[in-house]
Amino acid sequence: MTRISIIILTIFFWSCNQNQDFNKKPLETVDHELQTPDTLEKKNLSWVDQYVKWYLDQETENLKTTDSLTLSFIKDHQIRQGRETVQIRIGYDLQHRFEVRKWLYIDFETHSLAEYDLENDSLISWPNQKNFQSEIPKSGEYRYDIAFAEWQGKSMGEKVTVIIEGDSVKIRYEGDGNLSLSIKGDILDSGLLRKHVSGSWIIAESEMDIYAEEYGGCGSGPTIIDFKNKKYWTC
């Protein structure tokens, strides 16, 4: 009986340790093929994956599981409430079904992300994104100094007009100084206002730029825009 009891206790403690390992297991995502209805034009939606990763990074605690299932997601391209959106279903790919834990919708035009309230069939803006976007100045025109990276951020008397419309921006040169390759009215830069994973705000060409290894300065990556000190960084 003593041997049997020892064996049972050994199995019990081993099982407990396994469950602890599952609790510590990081969330993983497995991207599924995008499903696009025939009524909608097929588009490059690689940026959506980064949005889902961004969401999961901040919602890990709410989506934790104690089992060995791998968290994954399915993207669907569809129209909701007259808006073109990407529907995201986050859950577990089981043998005969997909068990959904969370529904998301991303608006094509504004790139705003909302969580789906199944009970009330309504969309609720994701509060973390609202806080994120609140750092962007209100739409309008602003005067910023040019910060030249090769001159340790000195402006050399050069300024630009920063035109903000929602989360988009254009940088217009007004001919204040002596930029040799630009004339008054030239658009020096334009794109999406996004916060890089480093914490710096950048002018992005695509959503993938928030993970760019090279940014700002004189490299080939996205440029930096400093709202607090009103500076547009360039080479």
Image (tube, rainbow, N blue to C red):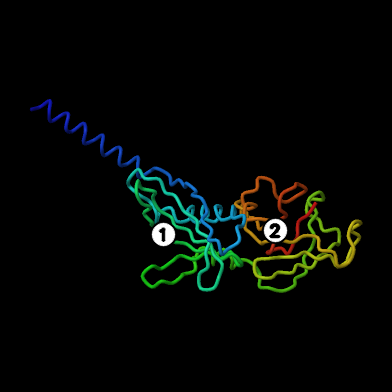
Count residues near mark 2 (Cα–Cα under 10 Å), then give few for <14, some for 14-19, many for 20+: many
In which quarter of the view is residue 138 placed? Answer: bottom right
Q: In the displayed structure, does residue 61 sit left or right of residue 231?
A: left
Q: Residue 157 carries which label?
A: none
From this viewpoint, which residue is outermost toward the top?
3
Amino acid type at mark 1: Lys
The residue under label 2 is: 203
From this view, report whether residue 186 is shown above or below residue 16. below
Q: Which of marks 2 and 1 is nearer the N terminus?
A: 1
**Residue 82 screen position, x and y as percent:** 54, 73
Secondary structure under the numbered disc 2 in the rendered image: strand
**Residue 118 screen position, x and y as percent:** 38, 67
**Residue 209 screen position, x and y as percent:** 65, 52
The alpha-carbon separation of the residues under discs 2 and 1 comes to 31 Å
Amino acid type at mark 2: Ile
- Between 64 and 29, the one lying in front of the other is 29
**Are the two marked residues, 2 and 1, in contact with CB atoms closer than 8 angstroms?**
no
Count residues near mark 1 (Cα–Cα under 10 Å), then give few for <14, some for 14-19, many for 20+: some
Secondary structure under the numbered disc 1 in the rendered image: strand
Badge nearest the viewer, 2 or 1: 1
In which quarter of the view is residue 48 placed? Answer: bottom right
**Residue 169 screen position, x and y as percent:** 71, 65
Q: Which mark is residue 102?
A: 1
Quarter of the image where the N terminus is located: top left
Q: In the displayed structure, does residue 82 sit left or right of residue 147?
A: left
- Between 35 and 197, the one lying in front of the other is 35
